[in-house]
């Protein structure tokens, strides 16, 4: 007994008292699906690559991005960014400029010459990809990274598909397409241009291919019957845009009328303006709200002086003049003729009424189903013919570059599984991190960084790129506006706010862990988690 | 503002940590190896604001003194839940005093350390005293006022949860008007605590013109840590008053502790400021102002204000008090 006077017990630590036994609810770390990722047709893990961009590790960000999409410099220019429509930050101030950061990463990769990692080993399987548009390129890339030997057969002289022959230069400079395609070819993908496939079954047999992915796109302009005088010049939008790539530029005249309300109509009108047309007028039978074109494109076109006749159809085309009829929407929102006519001066009429698929190569393939002019595919992107998959504009889809890239990826995964005699089952999707799951108190005020835009005079006379890129400073700022919805970004809040020291910090990049010996289940960590990465669940009794 | 905020790094200085900040700019609480002066296993209720506030404050003081710190602790929740004999959660030299004399005990420790230094002790060991609002504003007030006027070298920290929560939620002189406690029941013509009584001790501490007085809440960690650090730069008497919501006494959800503290600050109910030698030097401005109702409604101690006929007049009086704070301390002026 050498204890001090009146002391009979050694001082003990409260660690002996396991307060975890009080708990009725337990906190659980979760990874919820950020709404941007949920909205991305290419299945990009946007929050994950922004996370790396935030810390300035652009190469890691780019590598994370290109796990899903091999064309970020292209996509950062032409994608209509549904991700930004989903972004939770729009309810705080305005959406994160994901598309602008993607473009910055894409351009940075091209500038620094980052290359894709080659697959560790070859599978020995051969896959034929038909068409070098976004869908075909995406599939080729993913198949090559999975170790398959890929050959792309392209009917046209150059790779890119509608990205080259449908999207004007002022939106997508051609050197960007060249560079991003070349990077895929450097992976070992073989591109055969000027190789039109007459019959897919014969081509597969001849080339000893184990599977095929069809992505021929849709590039035959739809026609509409317009009573016209012989002298009237009526052309279709796709041929106009395609001939822009050749030596002989299309002759459209001083006054050009474009018929249609989609993005292609706007592209043609804007192209005509740059070619020197004094007037470029779009005629569309419905309203601006109902037009399939994206609003940002309509806005840019209007800025450039394109005129639009909403609620109008072309009744007749004569030499140097057309007649249009005014329409009115009926109760079901469908345009009905009003009997009111107007005359417009026009040297040429360009039809931009949508595109059809050239299905020639599929003749005689058993099992294949074609409906409404497009090829039907199952959930695994396989056509009715075993081993022949299809994607992009030639299957039922929204017909954007992003959707096409997504199809290519999805098909590649299914082809890979099919070649191994397996079925690809996508991992279950996490619950979406909706705005109500966030605690936005913790985010700093940070205004959206706007991309610079070319001045209007140059936009009306040259094919220079209209929307410019962000520099490193504002691209990183923009990346850091990300709220990291549903995914821990290591802000230490849970670790700091626990009144019971029951959160263990595992170190940079390793996140945290609960110490259930002492966690009383108060839930402060879950309430104060900025990004909604902690969930309270009832304890089992 | 008591510290230089990071204006923009995704979360700036709002979160506990921030992986984008250089390590030296991060908070004490974000460190992987922080002091954890009050350790796990204490018997505080789920979501206890006081347990959290005490760790925030004492860890910051430990950091500022390199761990050379002695703590005197008044009787109250904090002492009872942390140190039921023979166990303790404190990982530092810590002494339990009776309810009313913590300030005097701390004064004694400071005096003893002064003698030891005269005898050759080279380490600069500092003293902190802490207690709840009952032990500080009521029972220990005489000792505390003496410690202030003698300017003894002690940092006194009061954790204000507005009542005697340990003994069953009785009223203290820090209980806010209209709040229900066991001794100010929600009955009669003026239910809850009366208006016009009680005291705001930070103002009284300032009247002593001691070197440093500050208020803080558990909702603003960076501000709290900076104030403790600043307090340790002074010799003499210093006082920090920290608002710590009590889920049990206030009738709030255990997970809402920090949210309620934040609402107290954002509505102007609790002014967050710091003062040197009796003069206010800075305030933590309201970021997104809210009406007091937002603060009152989630608390059951104010439930009688939101019954079948809402007590609009009482709410208006509470709003007027908040507005007076906002005016008096300039809480809406820029940071």
Image (tube, helix red, strand yellow):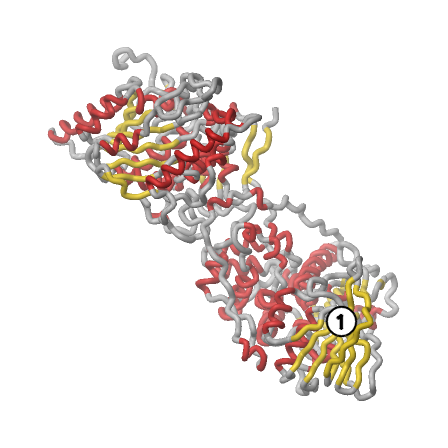
Quadrant of the frame with the C terminus of chain A: top right
From this view, report whether residue B12 is shown above or below residue B228. Answer: below
Subunit under mark 1:
A
Q: Position of residue B181 (x, y in %)?
A: 44, 20
Q: Position of residue A346 (x, y in %)?
A: 73, 83
Whether residue A330 can be seen here: yes
Secondary structure category for the residue under label 1:
strand
Residue at screen point 40% across, 28% down: B50
From this view, report whether residue A493 is shown above or below residue A308. Answer: above
Give the residue pinned by disc 1. Answer: A312
Image side of residue A35 versus residue A199, left or right: left
Residue at screen point 38% across, 18% down: B84
Figure disc tally: 1
B55 or A354, which is in the foreground? A354
Q: Position of residue A503 (x, y in %)?
A: 46, 35
Residue at screen point 48% across, 17% down: B188
Q: Position of residue A290 (x, y in %)?
A: 72, 62
């Amino acid at each position: 007994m050498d204890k001090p006077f009146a002391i009979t017990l050694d001082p003990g630590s409260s660690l002996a008292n396991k307060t975890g036994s009080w708990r009725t609810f337990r906190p659980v770390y979760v990874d919820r699906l950020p709404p941007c990722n949920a909205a991305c047709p290419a299945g990009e893990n946007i929050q994950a690559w922004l996370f790396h961009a935030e810390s300035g590790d652009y190469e890691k960000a780019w590598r994370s991005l290109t796990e899903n999409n091999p064309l970020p410099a292209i996509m950062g220019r032409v994608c209509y960014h549904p991700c930004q429509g989903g972004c939770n930050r729009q309810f705080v101030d305005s959406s994160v400029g994901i598309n602008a950061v993607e473009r910055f990463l894409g351009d940075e990769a091209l500038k620094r010459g980052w290359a894709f990692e080659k697959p560790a080993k070859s599978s020995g399987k051969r896959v034929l990809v038909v068409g070098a548009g976004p869908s075909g390129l995406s599939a080729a890339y993913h198949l090559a990274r999975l170790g398959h030997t890929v050959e792309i057969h392209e009917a046209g002289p150059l790779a890119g598909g509608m990205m080259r022959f449908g999207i004007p230069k002022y939106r997508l400079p051609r050197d960007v397409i060249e560079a991003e395609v070349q990077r895929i070819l450097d992976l070992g993908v073989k591109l055969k241009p000027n190789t039109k496939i007459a019959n897919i079954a014969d081509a597969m047999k001849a080339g000893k291919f184990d599977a095929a992915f069809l992505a021929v796109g849709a590039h035959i302009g739809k026609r509409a019957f317009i009573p016209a005088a012989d002298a009237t010049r009526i052309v279709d939008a796709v041929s106009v845009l395609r001939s822009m790539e050749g030596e002989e530029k299309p002759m459209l005249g001083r006054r050009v009328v474009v018929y249609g309300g989609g993005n292609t109509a706007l592209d043609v009108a804007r192209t005509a303006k740059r070619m020197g047309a004094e007037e470029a007028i779009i005629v569309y039978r419905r309203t601006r709200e109902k037009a399939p074109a994206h609003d940002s494109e309509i806005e840019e076109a209007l800025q450039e002086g394109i005129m639009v006749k909403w609620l109008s159809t072309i009744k007749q085309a004569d030499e140097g003049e057309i007649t249009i009829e005014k329409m009115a929407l009926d109760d079901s929102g469908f345009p009905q003729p009003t009997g009111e006519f107007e005359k417009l001066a026009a040297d040429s009429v360009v039809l931009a009424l949508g595109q059809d698929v050239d299905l020639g190569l599929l003749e005689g393939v058993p099992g294949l189903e074609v409906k409404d002019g497009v090829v039907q595919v199952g959930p695994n992107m396989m056509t009715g013919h075993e081993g022949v998959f299809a994607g992009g504009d030639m299957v039922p889809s929204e017909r954007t570059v992003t959707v096409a890239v997504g199809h290519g990826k999805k098909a590649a995964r299914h082809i890979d599984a099919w070649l191994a005699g397996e079925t690809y089952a996508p991992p279950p999707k996490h619950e979406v991190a909706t705005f109500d799951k966030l605690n936005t108190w913790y985010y700093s005020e940070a205004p959206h960084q706007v991309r610079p835009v070319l001045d209007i005079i140059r936009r009306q006379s040259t094919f220079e790129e209209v929307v410019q890129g962000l520099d490193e400073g504002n691209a990183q700022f923009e990346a850091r506006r990300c709220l990291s919805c549903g995914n821990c970004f290591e802000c230490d809040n849970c670790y700091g706010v626990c009144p019971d020291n029951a959160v263990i910090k595992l170190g940079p990049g390793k996140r945290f862990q609960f110490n259930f010996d002492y966690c009383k289940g108060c839930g402060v960590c879950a309430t104060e988690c900025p990004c909604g990465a902690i969930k309270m669940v009832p304890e089992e009794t | 503002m008591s510290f230089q905020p990071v204006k923009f790094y995704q979360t700036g200085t709002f979160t506990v940590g921030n992986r984008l900040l250089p390590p030296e700019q991060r908070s004490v609480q974000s460190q992987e190896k922080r002091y954890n002066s009050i350790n796990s296993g204490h018997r505080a209720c789920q979501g206890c604001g006081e347990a959290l506030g005490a760790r925030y404050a004492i860890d910051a003081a430990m950091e500022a003194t390199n761990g050379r710190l002695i703590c005197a602790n008044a009787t109250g929740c904090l002492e009872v839940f942390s140190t039921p004999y023979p166990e303790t959660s404190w990982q530092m030299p810590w002494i339990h005093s009776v309810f009313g004399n913590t300030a005097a005990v701390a004064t004694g420790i400071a005096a003893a350390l002064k003698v030891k230094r005269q005898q050759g002790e080279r380490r600069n060991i500092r003293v902190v005293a802490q207690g709840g609002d009952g032990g500080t504003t009521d029972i220990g007030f005489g000792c505390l006022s003496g410690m202030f006027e003698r300017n003894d070298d002690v940092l006194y920290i009061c954790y204000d949860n507005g009542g005697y929560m340990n003994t069953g939620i009785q009223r203290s002189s820090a209980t806010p008007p209209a709040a229900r406690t066991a001794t100010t029941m929600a009955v009669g013509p003026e239910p809850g605590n009366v208006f016009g009584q009680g005291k705001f001790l930070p103002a009284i501490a300032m009247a002593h013109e001691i070197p440093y007085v500050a208020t803080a809440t558990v909702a603003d960690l960076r501000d709290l840590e900076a104030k403790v650090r600043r307090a340790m730069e002074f010799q003499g008497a210093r006082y920090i008053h920290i608002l710590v919501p009590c889920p049990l006494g206030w009738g709030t959800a255990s997970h809402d502790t920090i949210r309620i503290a934040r609402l107290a600050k954002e509505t102007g109910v609790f002014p967050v400021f710091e003062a040197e030698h009796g003069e206010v030097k800075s305030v933590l401005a309201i970021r997104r102002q809210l009406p007091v109702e937002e603060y009152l409604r989630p608390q059951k101690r104010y439930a009688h204000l939101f019954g079948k006929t809402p007590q609009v007049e009482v709410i208006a009086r509470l709003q007027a008090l908040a507005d007076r704070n906002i005016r008096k301390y300039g809480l809406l002026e820029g940071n």
